[in-house]
Structures are given as structure tokens and as C-alpha cells.
Image (cartoon, rainbow, N blue to C red):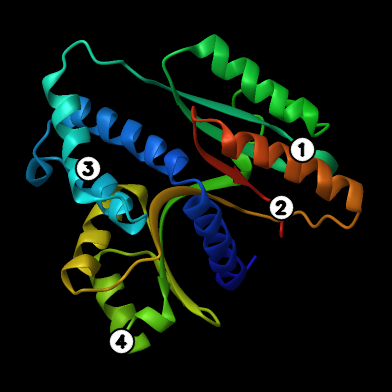
Amino acid sequence: MSGHSKFANIKHKKEKNDAAKGKIFTVIGREIAVAVKEGGADPANNSKLRDVIAKAKANNMPNDTIDRGIKKAAGDANSVNYEVLTYEGYGPSGVAIIVDTLTDNKNRTAANVRSAFSKGSGNVGTPGSVSYMFDKKGQIIIDKEECDMDADDLMMLALDAGAEDFSEEEDSYEVITDPDNFSQVRETLEKEGIPMAEADVTMIPQTWVELTDEEDIKKLTRTLDLLDEDDDVQAVYHNWDE
């Protein structure tokens, strides 16, 4: 699947999130809490927190909301501890799905994820059952319309900063990094004023599945929508070629 359709998918998701900012702000708020607990409240000394703050700003989260989240996580020793849980499974026609969650109630989250899969005629598998079909990578998507830098200069900037790959699509650029180099590359681009439509460590499918049956498409969309609406769900990765 090309970066072009990936970018179109991001814009689609952003529009959905704009209509339900509470969901994305909840997701990012939990990520802030986890980052602060793991590495402290000072972004200068916590690269994971810097990455989450950049993600928050990309999703138009107000600065005071970000600051409140950091202070709350740093100051409240009794604040809720979130557990990272990942679920893997299959949707219709063997579409592979990975669901990352941050939860304070494992039983509730497991029940909700299983329900979302079953309502779309899919099933949750065992750990490792589909993740071997994905590569964990840092991925940065840049909207061409928002970026003034020449493509060759941008590519050299990204590669010199430690990126693995750079590709130019119809309306976007895609930068791929090793997960360990993601923060360094993102920060280098940020310092140069490069606007990023998306910047995250993600799971990129090695192969894609096309769905031609309308019923299968409806079922898979139902599962993805249910997962998207769940506050415990942080991210959903799949290999459906939309």
C-alpha cells in the first residue's frame, strides 16, 4: 500500500478525531501519564515525553491541557497506573489486526476487544499470531502542501539524522526509521520547522489484503469502528488495503 493511501487514511482518521476530540485527547493523556511515570516530567530529559507532546500538538491539543496532564502525572503518586496490553487477531478474509491498549482494568478491556472482533465476524488470536506479519518502525508523514523544503533536501536531512528510508508519494513524503532512532529523526525535522501530519512508532504490514466482498468490508469496518471508539484502545494496526 502506498504512502499516498496511508496519508489519505490519516486525513480520514484526523477528520473523525476532530469530530470526537475527547477520544484522541484521552488517548494522548494516557500516553503522557505513562511517559511521565517512566521517565519523569521534564521533556528535556525524557525523549518519550517529547514524542508524545509532539503528537499532542499535531492533534491540536491545547498547551495548557498538555501541561496539566504532565503536572497531574508527576504530582499524583496515587494516580491510576495504566498497563500496556496488546491483542492480535483476524478479521474477515484473514485481515490481520493488532490492537494496542492502555488500561486500568484488564478484564473490561479484554471483553471489549473480543466483542469488537466477534461483532465483525473476526476472532482474537494468541500473542504473536499476526505480529510476525508486521515490522515495528518509526513513521513520519509530511504533507507536501505544508512543506516548503525541496524533496532532495528533505530526504538528505532525514537520512543524515538516521532515517532508514524516504519515499515521495503523490501528496506526501514518508520517512521510515528504526524505532530506536525515531525520536532523534523526529526532533531533527522539528528543529528545521518541518510540519508533520503524523509521527509515531507504528506497525507496518509486510503484505496487504484486498477485500472485494461488500459484506466483509462492512464487518471489518464495524470491528475497526468499535475499537476506535474504545477509550482503552491506543492504536489499531491492520493490513487491509483500503
Residue nearest the viewer, comparing 50 with 125: 50
For marks 3 and 1, give the one nearer the viewer: 3
Relative to residue 165, is residue 44 depicted above or below?
A: above
| Residue 236 image position (x, y, % from top left) | 56, 41
Q: Which residue is mark 4?
A: 148
Check disc 3: other Cα within 10 Å, few if <14, some if 14-19, many if 20+. some
| Residue 240 disc label | 2
Q: CA gap, disc 4 to disc 2?
A: 32 Å
Q: What element does badge 3 sit on?
A: helix
Counting residues from the N terminus, which is met first, the one under dot 2 or under dot 1?
Answer: 1
Q: Which residue is mark 1?
A: 91
| Residue 209 disc label | none
**Exactly how many numbered labels are in the figure?**
4
Counting residues from the N terminus, which is met first, the one under dot 2 or under dot 3?
Answer: 3
Q: Quadrant of residue 198?
A: bottom left
Residue nearest the viewer, comparing 99 with 77: 77
Q: Quadrant of residue 90?
A: top right
Q: CA gap, disc 4 to disc 1?
A: 40 Å
Relative to residue 82, is residue 142 depicted above or below?
A: below
Quadrant that contains the C terminus? bottom right
Q: Are marks 4 and 3 in contact (CB under 8 Å)?
A: no
